[in-house]
Amino acid sequence: MSPDVTGPLPSDVLVDQQADEPGPHPASDARAATRATIAMLVSRLVIAALGWAGSVLIARTLSPEDWGTYSFVFALLGLTAIFTDLGVGRAVMARLISDDPDEVAKTSSAFIALRVVLGVLGYLIAVAYVIVLQYPGDVVRATAVAGLVVVFATPAQALTVIFQSRHRLLLTAIAESLGQVLQLALTIAAVLVAPALLVFVLAPVANEILSLIIKIVGIMRRSSGLRPSRIVDWSRWKPMLSDALPLALGLALTIALQKVDVLLLSLLDSLDAVGIYSIGYKFSDIMDTLILAAIGPISTLLVAAWPSQSAVLRQRCRSAAAVFAASGAVAVAAFWPSAGPIIGLLYGDRFVVGADAARFLVLGAAITAFIVLGIFLLASTGHANRYPWIAIGGLALNVGLNVVLIPRYSYDGAAIATVVTFVVAAVALWVVIGRTLLITGLLPLGTLIALIALTAAACALGVWAAAESVPWPVVSAGAALVVAAPAVLLIRAVTTPPGRHTKVVR
């Protein structure tokens, strides 16, 4: 995966109370944020579909051992974000939405330069990891080639952040979609001409190179109004790092919390087990990708609303939480009863044994949405330093559970450990948010409880229907509808502005 995976936010979620927002700056333009969100979500859907198709071809072509190696390498590269991803620090975003063009240009160039250095650092760390721990030669060679993804994707993400500061993400969406088209084309060519592990890992590298080139061309155009300064002000790194460090540490720990199970599975079991387990991530990563696509424009709005518009911030947080919850609930309900047949159809019967693990990973992705929203809410309000302690506890819990469960239950144990950890981390995070911001009702708890109950009922009904030999497409569609219909009404209720009933405690 790239080192940087629920449903588009309806216009009224992002636009409500727009008339009350002061200032003409583009960062506060809720309509622009909606357009940016839709563009990124459409792009992520295209990327997810094409990436999914590519993974199906690779999983069916490579041997179980080589597929396990491929899955492990990209999970490891995902973990390099611990070292490469600054996140969107409040200071970085605050300077990017400045009205001073010179300030924006200097901040942009410093940020891009920093990300270039971090990308190279991440690559070296990934290669060093597999060499020091003496992984097989195929793993080392695949990491050395595929690791170039980190080198190109890390500065490319900096450009995305700059575009995001003005809600101008259409070019980013196009660039990343075209990159994925190229990756799939090269994957198909590899299947037909040279179905070897090292050839397959070249396709994602080409993807990132094309995406980066398009973004560079776009941002360097004078008409973009976002052209970085040609001179890098190295002194800006210190305030960027000091302000972003809590958020960067929190996001890094979250990435480790999400992916450490794959590394532990490779050490405590086998690469074949990693390959089976990683099929579940192919489904959960789709949800993660969509969440990250939506959270960018949302976080920009949260930064613009704080601290002068607490009521607006509250409403947008509630609206985003409701949409994330509803989207996750529909996905879980659709996938849970039909995981086995879906995996068998797409990836082959040899991966069906990992269906239970896949179910838990999809459930974990639904929970992750609230962790991501909470992290960006704290960052947007200048309290990112509150999260790393939660992430450290979550990581310790995840490692402990994996060490106990993997030797006994293999990939199923890893998946269970992941879900338990996410639940604990999400609850702890929102308790801290409530005590830190002192704003009531940031989460629509009634809606969340109703969606949890609906999802559990839909999954139980779907499992029963599947046992009665009802065709799995009918089972999945029916379970999704059981949740989706009431979810629309629940979202509508939450996204209706509360007006004078908003209570902010100070």
Image: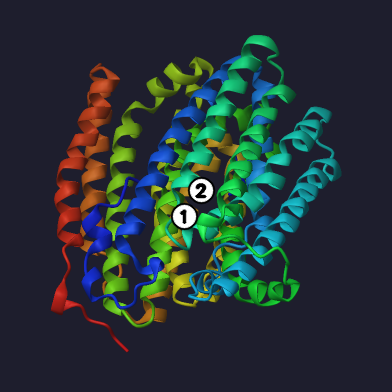
Q: Which numbered marker is on residue 418?
A: 2
Residue pictured at 52% horizontal, 73% vertical: 90
Please tell me in which quadrant of the rendered image residue 248 appears.
bottom right
Type of amino acid at the residue the image marks with label 2: Thr
Mark 2: secondary structure? helix
In the rendered image, residue 505, in percent from the top left (x then y), is placed at 29, 86
Can residue 5 be seen by looking at this rendering? no
Q: Residues within 10 Å of mark 2 (few under 14, many from 20)?
A: many
> Which part of the image, by quadrant, shows the N terminus?
top right
103 vs 449, left or right, is right
Residue pictured at 34% horizontal, 34% vertical: 336
Above or below, 190 relative to 230:
above
Q: Which numbered marker is on residue 199?
A: none
Of the pair 161 and 473, the residue shown nearer to us: 161
In the rendered image, residue 332, in percent from the top left (x then y), is placed at 33, 39
Asked whether the beta carbons under mark 2 and mark 1 sit within 8 Å of each other, the answer is yes
In the rendered image, residue 42, in percent from the top left (x then y), is placed at 38, 40
Above or below, 142 relative to 487:
above
Residue placed furthest toward the top: 192
Type of amino acid at the residue the image marks with label 1: Phe
Of the pair 32 and 72, the residue shown nearer to us: 32
Residue pictured at 26% horizontal, 57% vertical: 448
Instruction: Give the residue pinned by disc 1.
Output: 422
Of the pair 120 and 376, the residue shown nearer to us: 120
